[in-house]
Amino acid sequence: MTKKYRSQAYAAIHETMAALHDIGAIDKQTMRAFDERCLTPIQAMPPERIRALRERECLSQPIFALYLNVSRNLISDWERGVKKPGGPALRLLTVVEKKGIQAIA
């Protein structure tokens, strides 16, 4: 999966810093700091927003689960606030929120 940057300028800066890291000119800690500043942040998604997103896309819980490659029960748990999406699932939800379900279909 490609990295999503805040802007083209951040992408260029990050690419330069990655090259410097590859040759040993900057350390891993500095590179992590650039990752945090340059990459688009992913924020927690509350249950109401997940449900609204699914409904906006006119999808049932089982079909939404198929798109995200998770179980229907997990979608239900997210929408009820029993569990919270994290990692790749949260990234996919963010992509769907910004670009629609067709971005991952």
Image (spheres, grey):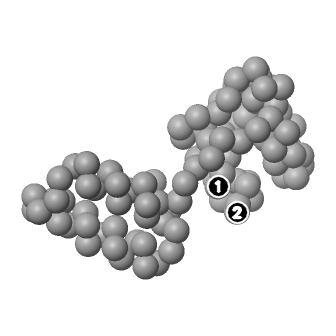
Label 1 CA crowd tier, 10 Å (few <14, some 14–19, many 20+): some
In the image, residue 12 above or below residue 96:
below
Give the SS element for disc 2. helix
For residue 25, side relative to residue 13 (left or right): left
User: Residue shown at 43%/64% (left/top)?
Assistant: 38
Quadrant of the rendered image containing residue 54: top right
| Kind of residue at disc 2 | Lys
Instruction: Return the residue at label 2.
Output: 99
Q: Residue furthest bottom?
A: 9
User: Residue shown at 42%/72% (left/top)?
Assistant: 10
In the image, residue 69 above or below residue 33:
above
For residue 66, side relative to residue 25 (left or right): right
How far is mark 2 from mark 1, CA to CA?
Answer: 6 Å
Give the SS element for disc 1. helix
For residue 61, side relative to residue 66 (left or right): right
Quadrant of the rendered image containing residue 63: top right
User: Residue shown at 66%/59% (left/top)?
Assistant: 103
Depth check: give the residue in front, 95 or 60: 95
Q: Residue furthest left?
A: 24
Q: Position of residue 20 (x, y in %)?
A: 17, 66
Residue 105 appearing in the image: no
Q: Position of residue 17 (x, y in %)?
A: 25, 67
Instruction: Return the residue at label 1.
Output: 95
In the image, residue 70 above or below residue 93:
above
Asked if the residues shown at circle 2 and circle 1 are in contact, with their CB atoms under 8 angstroms apart, the answer is: yes
Q: Position of residue 68 (x, y in %)?
A: 66, 39
